[in-house]
């Protein structure tokens, strides 16, 4: 029976085998050396001599840098601290700590290859992560590898990253009848929260934007909403923090997300009917206390259940707004700016979904006369 932690065993042939760390492969895997003795004492003495000889002088990879990939991940992350928004930094940290470091952190940088990354990607997909989530993780990995390559000029391997193919899933969109039913339900016993849901449905606001929206951002003189902040619940990286997560109210998702949205007179009339209009009051509560996104999601789930609607998430309201706009004949550029997109193609690819009625109407426009048909 070997003593705990010694790595000295009695073999089947009667000899004693002592194992020691000889070095590391580029993948980070330990390379063991072995020595043998007729007795336990002899094997222990031999391995003790070897360990003493290599103490503080362990073999390192041929590149001459014994730092693991985890070291370069942490160095890259430190550089991002002052370059990106706090919310983005937290997302980078989460992807590194939860996925990249456990999967690749033990490798030596020169041992990372296209094949190693492909195996890492396959492992993420096997865990049940969505293709989009895996793509985001690989994009962070790509950035870290680019940084690491700069520390090994001329010798770092060319690593190709192939992003997973996303299967296009048709998002949930309220049809005309469902939207009217939902609106009638919300208007029946309207309170600040129900009004906020209506406002999001009629303007395409994101959940973080409506949670951070205050009455001071709404102008009933100009019939406009000014979007200049968003709310998120993020992992708290402060060791002095009181909880695992915290609420952050900060700038919108991107520069184009900061925008001014016009609204109709009917929406202005709803605004006048609703609660406090004090500039510092939050729209969803009518007071200086905010409602966070998780609570609003729970409220929406309750509303849609009572209204008989299934599969509705807050982003469904945004998709539905974009679809209603295209049905009404909006030009794509205006809709893109209202939604806060940097490119009109984003609006077209992700948010615009023609209803069956619109498709049928367009098909009726086709003229097959002159082709021998009646």
Image (tube, rainbow, N blue to C red):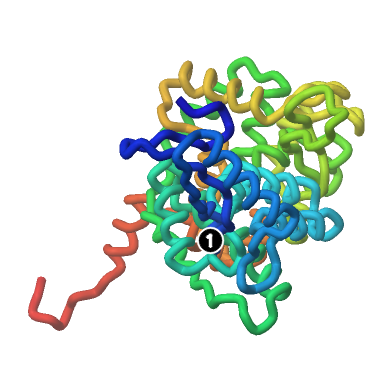
306 to 297, vertically: above or below: above
Where does the C terminus fall, quadrant-wise? bottom left
39 to 298, vertically: above or below: below
Residue situated in front as seen by the camera: 337 or 257: 257
Q: Please state the horizontal and vertical placement of residue 75, each as a whole percent of the image.
A: 77, 58
Q: Please state the horizontal and vertical placement of residue 59, each as a whole percent of the image.
A: 64, 63
Q: Quadrant of residue 147?
A: bottom right
Q: In the displayed structure, does residue 243 sit left or right of residue 356?
A: right
Q: Please state the horizontal and vertical placement of residue 38, each as a whole percent of the image.
A: 44, 40
Residue furthest toward the right?
279
Circle 1 is placed at which residue position?
25
Report how many numbered discs are placed on residues in the image: 1
Which residue shows up at 24% across the image and 74% down it? 367
Residue furthest toward the left?
372
Which residue shows up at 48% across the image and 56% down it? 352
Which residue shows up at 54% across the image and 52% down it? 30
Q: Quadrant of residue 209?
A: top right
Residue situated in front as seen by the camera: 223 or 202: 202
Mark 1, Cα crowd under 10 Å, few <14 / some 14-19 / many 20+, is: few
Q: Please state the horizontal and vertical placement of residue 214, each as a whole percent of the image.
A: 83, 35
Q: In the displayed structure, does residue 77 sit left or right of residue 50?
A: right
212 to 152, vertically: above or below: above
Q: Visible in this render: residue 165?
A: yes
70 to 309, vertically: above or below: below
Which residue shows up at 73% across the image and 23% down it? 192
Residue situated in front as seen by the camera: 300 or 178: 300
Q: In the displayed structure, does residue 2 sit left or right of residue 187?
A: left
Where does the N terminus fall, quadrant-wise? top left
Dot 1: element:
loop
Q: Visible in this render: residue 174?
A: no
Q: Quadrant of residue 188?
A: top right
């Amino acid at each position: 029976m070997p003593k705990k932690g010694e790595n000295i065993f009695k073999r089947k042939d009667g000899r004693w085998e002592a194992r020691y760390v000889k070095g590391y492969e580029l993948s980070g895997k330990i390379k063991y050396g072995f020595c043998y003795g007729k007795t336990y004492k002899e094997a222990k003495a031999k391995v003790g001599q070897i360990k003493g000889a290599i103490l503080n002088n362990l073999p390192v990879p041929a590149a001459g840098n014994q730092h693991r990939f985890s070291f370069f991940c942490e160095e890259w992350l430190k550089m991002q601290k002052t370059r990106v928004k706090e919310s983005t930094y937290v997302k980078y940290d989460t992807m590194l700590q939860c996925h990249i470091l456990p999967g690749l952190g033990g490798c030596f940088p020169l041992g990372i290859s296209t094949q190693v990354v492909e195996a890492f990607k396959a492992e993420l997909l096997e865990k049940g992560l969505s293709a989009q989530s895996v793509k985001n993780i690989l994009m962070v990995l790509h950035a870290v590898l680019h940084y690491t390559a700069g520390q090994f000029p001329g010798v770092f391997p060319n690593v190709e990253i192939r992003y997973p193919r996303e299967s296009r899933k048709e998002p949930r969109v309220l049809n005309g009848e469902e939207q009217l039913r939902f609106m009638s339900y919300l208007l029946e016993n309207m309170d600040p929260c129900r009004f906020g849901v209506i406002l999001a449905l009629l303007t395409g606001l994101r959940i973080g934007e409506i949670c951070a929206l205050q009455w001071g951002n709404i102008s009933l003189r100009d019939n406009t909403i000014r979007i200049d902040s968003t709310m998120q619940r993020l992992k708290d990286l402060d060791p002095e923090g009181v909880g695992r997560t915290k609420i952050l109210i900060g700038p919108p998702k991107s520069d184009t997300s900061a925008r001014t949205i016009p609204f109709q007179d009917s929406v202005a009339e709803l605004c006048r009917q609703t609660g406090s209009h004090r500039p510092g009051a939050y729209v969803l509560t009518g007071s200086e206390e905010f409602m966070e996104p998780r609570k609003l999601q729970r409220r929406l789930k309750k509303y849609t259940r009572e209204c008989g609607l299934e599969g509705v998430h807050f982003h469904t309201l945004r998709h539905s707004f974009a679809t209603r706009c295209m049905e009404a004949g909006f030009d794509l550029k205006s809709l893109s700016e209202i939604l806060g997109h940097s490119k009109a193609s984003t609006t077209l690819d992700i948010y615009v979904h023609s209803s069956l009625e619109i498709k049928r109407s367009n098909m009726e426009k086709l003229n097959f006369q002159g082709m021998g048909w009646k």
